[in-house]
Image: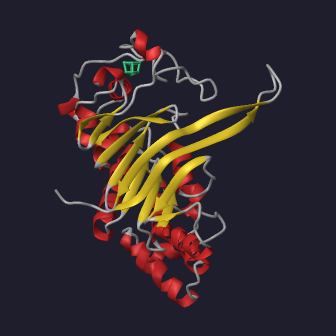
Amino acid sequence: MEQRNTVIHLEHVRKEFSVDNRFFSKGKRTVKAVNDLTLDIKKGEILGLVGESGSGKTTLARVILSLTKITGGSVLVDGVDIGKASKEEKKEFRRKVAVMFQDPASNLNPRETVESSIMRPLVLHGMPKKEARKKALETLRSVKMDERYLYSYPHQLSGGQLQRIAIARALAIDPQIMILDEPTSALDVSVQAQILNLLLDLQEQRNLTYLVITHDLNVIRYISDRVVVMYLGKMVEVGPTDVICTNPSHPYTKALMAASPILDPTLRGREKSIMKGDPGSLIHLPEGCHFHPRCPCAMALCAKEEPGCTALAEDHQVWCHLCK
Ligand code: SF4
């Protein structure tokens, strides 16, 4: 099996926020958005990150992008600890890691032409305008759009075209890692597959590393090599996409898969797993296993003791007492 280098290493990462608790008592409460998370992302892999709202997946992306300061632990990108990086290393980091947010229109300035939008990050990184203009055209072609779109404004483009421009803008700086936040959720179903296929082609051509954050498990099934499942700020299961999607081990992963509409007919007809209630609060985390108030398999032990990590295979880990 091919050994890939680690490009992102997260070591016991914690991210906590203080919030005012105005209604019931004075003082601040702590939200544990990401709680003691250790994970490696390998060069050239497509890693899917799934979980309900409040699972911590978007906060984790912000941590990797260095948009928010971590409370504990460390984040290393290509071996450089971004919390201790020099000015030069931070500049290099911004060139290496690109992000594409879910709403393509929000990635673009409505008053700027496509050309200006793609050129802007290049000029900010010090590229002369003439060169940046040439690069903008080259990048536009790589997302399968032609020259005439260079002078269009966002309002003149369809959702799919806007998403292609957003991809081109992220790609222009020649990043090694792309964080894709809900890359197709704002698009019509008919366009979603085109954008996913484009992302797969670009990943292969440029040996990019993707971190794909989504609630849409069909996107994960289609695009990812590996999946991380998060619940209330913690990882509950990590493994290859085919294992996680067809034979998950954690009751939460099973419930997520069962709740997702399945487009692939070969995967239909699986046993349904019923998940009770809403995700809990990140302020009042349940004792023991955080999932126990909703888990259909909970035992007495689950309310008392937090499960540790069990390796079911070299590349498949789960945090559940049932899997010991
Ligand atoms: Fe359910 Fe217990 Fe496993 Fe948590 S540890 S997922 S409550 S069985």
Residue 228 or residue 103, whichever sits in front = 228
Residue 87 or residue 208, whichever sits in front = 87
Residue 57 percent across, percent down from the top left: 50, 42
Look at 61% across and 77% down and name the residue there. 124
Query: From what the image shows, is residue 160 above or below residue 80?
Result: above
Q: Quadrant of the N terminus?
A: bottom left
Residue 46 percent across, percent down from the top left: 33, 53
Query: From what the image shows, is residue 147 above or below residue 209?
Result: below
Query: From what the image shows, is residue 39 above or below residue 308?
Result: below
- Locate residue 84 relative to residue 4 in the image: left or right: right
Q: Quadrant of the C terminus?
A: top left
Look at 35% across and 14% down and name the residue there. 297
| Residue 140 visible at all | yes
Residue 285 percent across, percent down from the top left: 57, 24
| Residue 294 visible at all | no
Which quarter of the figure has residue 109?
bottom right
- Locate residue 315 relative to residue 236 in the image: left or right: left
